[in-house]
Amino acid sequence: MRVFISGAAGFLGSHLTDRLIKEGHTVIGLDNFITGNRANLAHLADNPKFSLMEQDVSKFIAVDGELNFVLHLASPASPSKSSPLGYPNLPIQTMKAGALGTHNTLGLAKIHNAQFLLASTSEVYGDPLVHPQPESYWGNCDPVGVRSVYDEAKRFAEALTMAYHNFHGLDTRIVRIFNTFGPRMRLDDGRSVPNFIQQALRGESLTIYGTGEQTRSFCYVDDLIDGIRLLMDSDEHMPVNIGNPQEVSIIEFAVRINELTGNTAGLQINASERLGDDPERRQPDITRAKTILGWEPRVSLRDGLSETIDYMRMKMENNLS
Ligand code: NAD
Ligand code: UDP
């Protein structure tokens, strides 16, 4: 296949690019590096199966020649209000990537008669009132809340994807990604995983926003990429949750990281850093992924964290982000 990936320099986009190239496909990546990292693609610089368009996805995109698959991953993804890479600090760019970027990449797929995949998110469920979250749940979102620039852009993106499917007959997929972590996350994007691991490796106490009783379910990146590949090869058009159903409180998660790094500095409650509509509980119902794709995660939290800690230690020792 000749595949187009927006957000190719990001955490997930670069792993997906690697997977597809390893399988023998050709990848055209697009990125404007607003939250991405050139280092994530450096190893592909001389690979004839990879090329990069340095461009904003919310501007018109032209690609010559055949395209078989278009994947739209470009979007800020961190909810941090203290990192400049967090979407609360990139509100218009986030809405444009989800709205105009989805329109442009759908248009690109349509003109090339290519298949299309949208990277959506568990954030479409907002602060969920149904637990765990199945795809049939409509969500609990505040359209003007602090997370709305991300949530509503992704909800619009899903609606536009379905409109192209239903009206133009485009062959589309929607993956709802739950918290995913692993090597190539940026150390400075303010998400819980890089924050906690860096604090632990520096021997500092880990900053818990709010009470720390809020939960998340963390999926290792290799499992997530397996799920996306299976979804690409399926003929499922309705949204599919991909995530690890092992739910942990943020306190439990932070304690695990302290244990794995041997950090004895403990935890520090930082209530004021918590975003207003930070979801209380989040856990994917993966029945559809299991049934339709035969997918379920295989990597344990311990193994995934160990890989990520090794990666972040290497970055810190070399003063890299
Ligand atoms: P990331 O920030 O590492 O990657 C996003 C990439 O998109 C970056 O390289 C960034 O520079 C690029 N980008 C952003 N806006 C752009 C624009 N206007 N034009 C061109 N490029 C642009 O984040 P990630 O974690 O890899 O997330 C990738 C996708 O997966 C996002 O759409 C995100 O919403 C979705 N997602 C991720 C998670 C997760 O836990 N990692 C969870 C749910 C959804
Ligand atoms: N969080 C935290 N300390 C940090 C960063 C995040 O306690 O240094 C909390 C955050 O408030 C949220 C959870 O950890 O409740 C997961 O946050 P993350 O940044 O991973 O993304 P989210 O799941 O909220 O999109």
Image: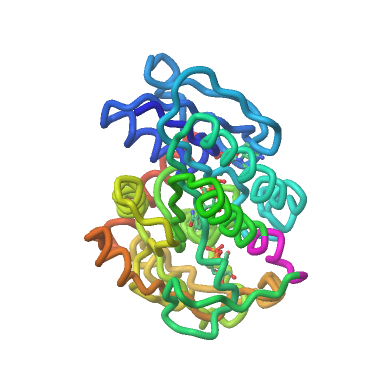
The residue depicted at 48 percent of the width and 59 percent of the height is 193
Q: Residue 119: image x %, image y %?
A: 50, 51
Note whether residue 319 is visible.
no
The residue depicted at 40 percent of the width and 76 percent of the height is 248
- Looking at the image, residue 174 lies above or below residue 139: above
Q: Is residue 107 magenta?
A: no
Q: Is residue 150 magenta?
A: yes
Q: Quadrant of residue 306?
A: bottom left
The residue depicted at 41 percent of the width and 70 percent of the height is 217
- Looking at the image, residue 168 lies above or below residue 237: above
Q: Nearer the viewer, residue 13 or 274?
A: 13
Indicate left or right for 185 with 150 as reference.
Answer: left
Q: Residue 196: image x %, image y %?
A: 50, 61
Q: Residue 114: image x %, image y %?
A: 45, 35
The residue depicted at 42 percent of the width and 35 percent of the height is 69
- Quarter containing the C terminus: top right
Q: Nearer the viewer, residue 311 or 144?
A: 144
Task: Give the magenta range.
Answer: 144-152
Q: Nearer the viewer, residue 48 or 238?
A: 238
Q: Quadrant of residue 288?
A: bottom left
- Looking at the image, residue 23 lies above or below residue 215: above
Q: Residue 28: image x %, image y %?
A: 47, 26
| Total numbered circles | 0
Indicate left or right for 149 with 245 as reference.
Answer: right
